[in-house]
Structures are given as C-alpha cells and as structure tokens.
C-alpha cells in the first residue's frame, strides 16, 4: 500500500477556485486560441510515417540497470530493478474526446500494449487528451496490479471509469511505494478537457526516486524558474525527460510549451547527466512540422547529452 507525505517546498498555485502558474504567464485564453487557429499556417507533415519498428521490453531489468523505452509522444517505460513505471500513456489513434475527433497520430506506438511488461505505476501529468487517454488507461487497468498517480482533481475522472487504485498528489506531495517514491513537482502549463473546466484540476511533473537515482519527468511545461526550484529541492538528476515539441508560434505557445532551445537550458539548470526528448514525433499539435523539434534540438545542443529516441527505441543507462 502506498503512503503519502507532504513537504512545503513550492509556491502557492490555487486561488480557492482554479489552479494557476505562480509568478509566471498563464495559459492563453480562448480568444487567443481562436486568433491562432484563424491565422495558423502549420508546416506540412506526412499523413503517416511508416518507420516504426516495434520492440518488446524485458519484463524486468537487472539490479543496477536503468532502461528507458520511448513508446510515443510523452509515453515512456522506465525500468529499474524495483520499478516499471509508465508515463502519460496513449495508444489511441487520436488524442481527443472520442475516437474520431482530435489530432491523429502520424506514427505507430513503438511498443504494442499487449507487449508491455508488468507496470507498477502509471504517472499522469495532467488531463489533456494527449496525456490522459481513457481508452488506454482502461486497457492498462484490465491488466491489473498497477497504481495510477495523478495531480489534484484528476482522480475523480479515473474513478468514474473504474480505473484504480489512484493516488492524487499536490506539488510537494510524495507517494511512497515498495522500492520507489514518486514526488509531484511544479510545471508551467494548464488543464482542460472542455471549455468549461479550464484550470479546475492541477498539472505537474514528477521526480522518481529509485535505486538511489533521481529521474525527472517534466510532463508538459513552459520554461521557467521552477526548474531551479526543483534542482534546489532534490539535487542534480541522473535522467531528465523533457518536452521539445508543440512550441510554434511562440507568441501563443511560450506560456505552456518549451522550445528545443529552452529544453537544453532546462537540462543544464537541472544538472541532468542525461536528458531524453519527449512530446514530439507522433502528434502534430502546433505549427512546426512533425520532425522539426528533433532537428532544432540537434542544432541546439553541442554537448550531446540529450538523447532523441524514435518510437520503440531504448537507452540503457547506469
């Protein structure tokens, strides 16, 4: 059974009615969204790129191993001796409220859902459809023996679908499990699944503490002072999972998504030994083309400490 603890580390982010980004720009409103959609000129991308070789991760890894497998988008399998953890899983064809609505995938998942190893914990960073995909979560629930960890306010949605056990965390709260601990940390983003529930639930990143290693999963976030706060609270990271996609146009996206150049700055601030790029290559959610983020990242990181994985590819660290 998981145990929860709370440490007051991070600034206030709830006004009694809605959550907000403290000391930072808020997400653009619906008038700006309408302006973007009316003026948007997305760069073209292929309808579907058939270049994914699906792989089958091992059921468990050795005592000192750290294995990262990119499924797609922000869905990764993190494997250590005491923990198999899955982040923001999505296997659906579209990221939307129903099967025929929402951004469609341009690449297949790199791991078939039926080929997943046992999953000890699923981390959900916020309630957007490309990060909280109910059809996928229902299928994961049917496998059994998985704990779902979500930000404040999100558990009700999962429980309505009979998905659980589910644990809600506020920024600064931790969930302790046999062999690993999950800490909720700030992100600069927003939440919404309709026009009526904006900022009614929290968004977050997570720090995974396991095998004397620290792994940071950013979820979705803009660039901001929270990276330094997280580094101060936890120390340098063995691994950071940082989003690099959905960043154009900057006048609209900069309050909620990092550019690849900003992701490199975040990597440096966090003191990460290695970072892996996420949130790119599967769904085209903004004006840049499908594979522009990874090209921009390659042009922005002379140190070579950022890894770009294709769907289905793994990296083994120690």
Image (tube, grey):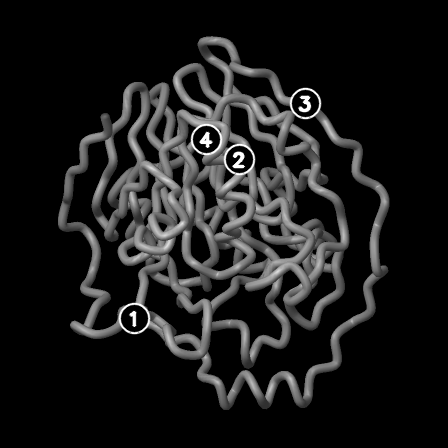
Query: What number is the disc on residue 20?
Result: 1
Mark 1 or mark 2, which is nearer to you? 1
Mark 3 or mark 2, which is nearer to you? 3
Mark 1 or mark 3, which is nearer to you? 3
Q: Tag 1's secondary structure?
A: loop
Label 4, residues with CA under 10 Å away: few <14, some 14-19, many ≥20: many
Mark 1 to mark 2 CA distance (whole Å): 30 Å
Mark 4 to mark 1 CA distance (whole Å): 28 Å
Label 1, residues with CA under 10 Å away: few <14, some 14-19, many ≥20: many
Whether pointer 4 and pointer 1 mark residues with C-beta atoms closer than 8 Å, the reply is no
Mark 2 to mark 4 CA distance (whole Å): 18 Å
Q: Which residue is mark 4?
A: 85
Q: Position of residue 224 (x, y in %)?
A: 39, 63
Indicate which disc, 4 or 1, sits on the residue closer to the N terminus: 1
Q: Which residue is mark 3?
A: 56
Label 2, residues with CA under 10 Å away: few <14, some 14-19, many ≥20: some
Q: Quadrant of residue 292?
A: bottom right
Mark 2 or mark 4, which is nearer to you? 4
Query: What number is the disc on residue 274?
Result: 2
Taking the spot 28% from the left edge, 39% from the top edge, the residue there is 234
Whether pointer 1 and pointer 3 mark residues with C-beta atoms closer than 8 Å, the reply is no
| Left or right of 211, for residue 108 | right
In the image, 253 versus 299, the foreground residue is 253
Mark 4 or mark 1, which is nearer to you? 4
Q: Tag 3's secondary structure?
A: loop
Whether pointer 1 and pointer 2 mark residues with C-beta atoms closer than 8 Å, the reply is no
């Amino acid at each position: 059974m998981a145990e929860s603890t709370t440490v007051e580390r991070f600034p206030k982010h709830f006004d009694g009615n809605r959550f907000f980004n403290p000391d930072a720009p808020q997400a653009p409103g619906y008038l700006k969204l309408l302006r973007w959609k009316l003026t948007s000129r997305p760069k073209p991308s292929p309808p579907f790129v058939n270049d994914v070789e699906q792989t089958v991760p091992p059921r468990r890894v050795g005592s000192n191993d750290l294995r990262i497998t990119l499924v797609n988008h922000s869905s990764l399998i993190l494997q250590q001796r005491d923990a198999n953890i899955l982040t923001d899983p999505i296997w659906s064809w579209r990221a939307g409220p129903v099967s025929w609505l929402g951004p469609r995938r341009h690449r297949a998942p790199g791991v078939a859902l039926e080929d997943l190893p046992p999953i000890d914990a699923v981390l959900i960073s916020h309630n957007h459809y490309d990060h909280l995909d109910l059809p996928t979560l229902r299928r994961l629930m049917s496998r059994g023996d998985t704990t779902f960890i979500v930000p404040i306010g999100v558990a009700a949605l999962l429980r309505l679908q009979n998905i659980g056990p589910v644990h809600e965390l506020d920024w600064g709260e931790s969930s302790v499990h046999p062999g690993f601990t999950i800490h909720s940390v700030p992100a600069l983003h927003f939440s919404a699944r309709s026009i009526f529930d904006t900022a009614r639930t929290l968004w977050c990143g997570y720090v995974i503490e396991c095998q004397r290693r620290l792994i940071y999963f950013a979820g979705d976030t803009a660039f901001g002072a929270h990276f330094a706060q997280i580094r101060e609270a936890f120390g340098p990271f063995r691994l950071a999972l940082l989003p690099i996609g959905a960043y154009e146009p900057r006048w609209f996206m900069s309050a909620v998504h990092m550019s690849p150049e900003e992701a490199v700055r975040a990597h440096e601030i966090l003191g990460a030994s290695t970072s892996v790029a996420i949130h790119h290559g599967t769904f085209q959610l903004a004006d840049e083309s499908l594979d522009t983020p990874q090209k921009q990242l390659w042009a922005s990181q002379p140190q070579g400490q950022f890894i770009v994985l294709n769907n289905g590819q793994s990296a083994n660290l120690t």
